[in-house]
Amino acid sequence: MELQKFSYDNRMTRNFAIATIVWGVVGLLMGLLVALQIFLPWMNFGLEFTTFGRTRPLHTNAVIFAFVGNAIFTAVYYSLQRLLKTRMYSELLGKIHFWGWQSIIVAAAVTLLAGFTTGKEYAELEWPIDIAITLVWVVFGWNMFGTILQRRTSHIYVSIWFYIATWVTVAVLHIFNSLAVPVSFLKSYTLYAGVQDALVQWWYGHNAVAFFLTTPFLGMMYYFVPKISGRPVYSYKLSIVHFWSLIFLYIWAGPHHLLYSSLPDWLQALGTTFSVMLLAPSWGGMINGLLTLRGAWDKVRRDPILKMFVVGITAYGMATFEGPLLSFKSVNAISHFTDWTIGHVHIGALGWNGLLTFGMIYWLVPRIYNTTLYSTKLANIHFWISTLAIVFYAVPLYIGGITQALMWKQFTPDGFLMYPNFLETVTQLIPMYAIRAFGGFLYVSGFFILVYNIVMTIKAGSFVADEEAQAPALEVMPVGKTSSESGHRFLERKPIRFLIFATIAILIGGIVEVIPTYLIKSNIPTITSVKPYTPLELQGRDIYVKEGCYNCHSQMIRPFRSETERYGEYSKAGESVYDHPFQFGSKRTGPDLAREGVKTGRNYKPDAWHYNHFIDPQKMNEASIMPAYPWLAIKEIDIQSTPGKIRAMKLLGVPYPDNYEHQAIADLKAQADSIAKNLATAGIQTDSNREIIALIAYMQRLGVDIMNKPVKE
Amino acid sequence: MHTNDEDQLNKQEEIHHEVDDATQIKYFGGDHEYDGIKELDNPLPPWLKYLFYVTIVIAFSYMMLIFVFEDDDFVQHKEYRKEMIAARAKTDEAVNEEATKAATVAPPSKEEILAAGKTIFDKTCLVCHGKFGEGLVGPNFTDDYWIHGGNPEDLLKVVNEGVIEKGMISYKSQLNKTQINNVIQYILSLQGTNPPNQKAPEGEKFVKN
């Protein structure tokens, strides 16, 4: 066989690796900042751009899409060429992919801090950026499939199966979850409302974890673990079984983020059951990774890079055991809305994503710079600091989460809540938050060791832009399946067919769950007393979304005695039908607000209280950890945007009267004046055109509608 | 042509049937080699396979319970109703027990009442009335001006029913009778304490009748 000479392009690998490190610094520092802000309100610095509601989405977006995203591309651009014995398909597409992705990250950082957000977790970016993401993702796929199709190997390796599944699923999730009606250049309303929006969002959110944080990293694991250890993959058969079962089952599990919410029971049941069935397929990946190291454990003892992979894969095993556990309703009743969830995701994020990325960088950078790692000792220190950091990070959050949940549920013997004041349950957590922040500090410190080590490595080496390689040309394969090859082996040499099968596998769950929720009326029973928001309330709601209130406050009272006693009647599906986007929230750092406006309710506060509380929460309650929002009393409501917003809502099916957009501004002003007048009676002088007025109007509307008439279940 | 290709594939399968030195497991045959990475011909670990079967059985039993049998413990509005009924029964029992106990035990001292009242005040009232009752959004408790009257029965009425138009909610369902009495005694004890940052007087000067 004649050997063909060609070269691997290392430029994009290098670019993505450096971007991974740079955004790693940013994302981890943002993480440390929000960890401090959560128990030290002054760390919000009294500025809208640096307040938790905006910094927390920046942290999550930066670590997921910037740090992990670039790590994925580093792995793909390095391993794809070598696994397929070919150069990347197009340098130009690679450049567009790289610079496009980095521009998206910069745009994301700027817009998130400026308060442009869709209010949907991990999908906060506004519509122009969403379109850019879609285009860049297509470029990435084009470059990847171009490379696959010009390969010199007959079959595609398991890493590439995972890359393919990642590519198609992320595309589907991103496009369908981001569908929205634009109101202006950086403001849109999501296509879906309330419970439907929640379902689509968590179908997306859960599978962003699955197909952005899990499958590409499994692909990475399948390449780097055998490469670094020099050991064969433990079981090809296991690869096949766990790959297909994982991608098929994962997509169904989204509703486990909405257990005990107003999501219909049947959807919740699917969320629970498919999560339980995910355990073995997830562990299949862990087993195949760890058992590949059989016969190389002496190497693991000596090599910090392999140690990172081992602890990372183990963290994956722990997180994927905990996932199904948290999907049981009885466990979820305790864990949900608490810090337990935050601890759980960080086992995956810091352990699995973080350590695998570090390991990959330590191994790959010296290779493309034709040198050895500057210091193995420093890498070893980094490994130990990171591992310790994970313990310091997660343990206090588990303790804190369970403590708080139990306090929420505690009753006195004569039937009253033991801790009726929500704040009491928060004060308990402060020491835990401090320890968690220390864990975060350790993790960041470790990362700076990596930065130093890699900079020194790069300085000592010389970059190999084009790495010479040779391989025999691809022989012509039979078109159909031969009698000696298995069906799956046949599929492995038919990448387009593989893509189609993977697409079918990931679509089924979503179709079964989403479509009936739209078409079958009984899933969301109508409540006639629920009416659209007034123009002022709508503006107030947009401010609520803009300030990221959903990061700390839920709007979803679960059907538990401990919640209905604390907050009032539990939330019904028909209540949120005009909510674009839904604001159920996923964490209660502060109390639930679903019935905040109900005058006969437990949590009712007068307008004046809200005013003072927004401006200086600690004045109302010394121990409060809520940041202050003084600018709300200074900034004016964007009144001129009102007609456009009403029109967009009408387009989405919200039943405002005909031509209401012309009436909207007058109605808004009248309602704002009456609130300002009410504040004046309490001795607060303010203009009626301030944002705080709109937000108060929204607060006082929350949960009110169904109290107007008795509801039937 | 076609058969030649098949022969070639078959030949490759045969050539690669080597054994891994470290584990003595057969490599997967054929062209299972990618950038030097080989794959072993191990079966699925049996325990993992059975774990998968068990989770499937659990999942389907769970679905049967909810979709077919509509079990009370899995349909959430039924679950809620059950929880509320059970809680009510338990609470009634506890309240009765408390009442029998209270009849035999000596009544608490003034100090005990005020201390208990302060605990409730600090949890519940201070948010609107200030840490020392100096007034914040709600009125000042330390001067002798009262909006709704300063007799214990006036305070009781406000705590029980609330003054919704002013933002004072009803606490009837959050505090029991003893707790309400304790906190009222505590509030009345604040009269004339003269803390800093007092809110201006509201209502009318109160003369005890």
Image: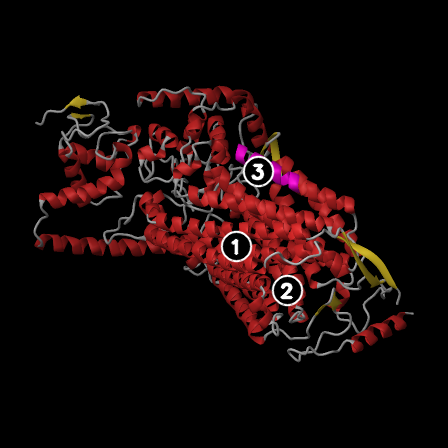
Q: Residue furthest bottom?
A: B24
Q: Indicate the quadrant containing the N terminus of chain A: top left, top right, bottom left or bottom right.
A: bottom right
Q: Which residues are the magenta region?
A: A102-115
Within 10 Å of the Cα at label 1, are there few (<14), some (14-19), or many (20+) other Cα atoms?
many
Parent chain of label 1: A
Q: Of the two numbered discs 3 and 2 on the same chain, state the one appearing first in sequence.
A: 3
Q: Give the x, y percent position of residue B98.
A: 16, 54
The quadrant in which residue A285 appears is: bottom right
Main SS of the magenta part reads helix
Q: Residue furthest front?
A: A460
Q: How is the image coloured?
A: secondary structure
Q: Which residue is mark 3?
A: A109
Q: Which residue is mark 2?
A: A225
Amino acid at dot 2 = Val
> Is A218 left, or right, of A141 in this rendering?
left
Above or below B7: residue A657: above
Residue B85 can be seen, yes or no: yes
Instruction: Kindly identify the residue that appears in the image at 78 percent across and 70 percent down.
Output: B31
Residue A113 located within the stretch drawn in magenta: yes
**Helix, strand or loop status at disc 3:** helix
Instruction: Kindly identify the residue that appears in the image at 37 percent across and 28 percent down.
Output: A611
Above or below A506: residue A706: above
User: Which disc number belongs to residue A350?
Assistant: 1
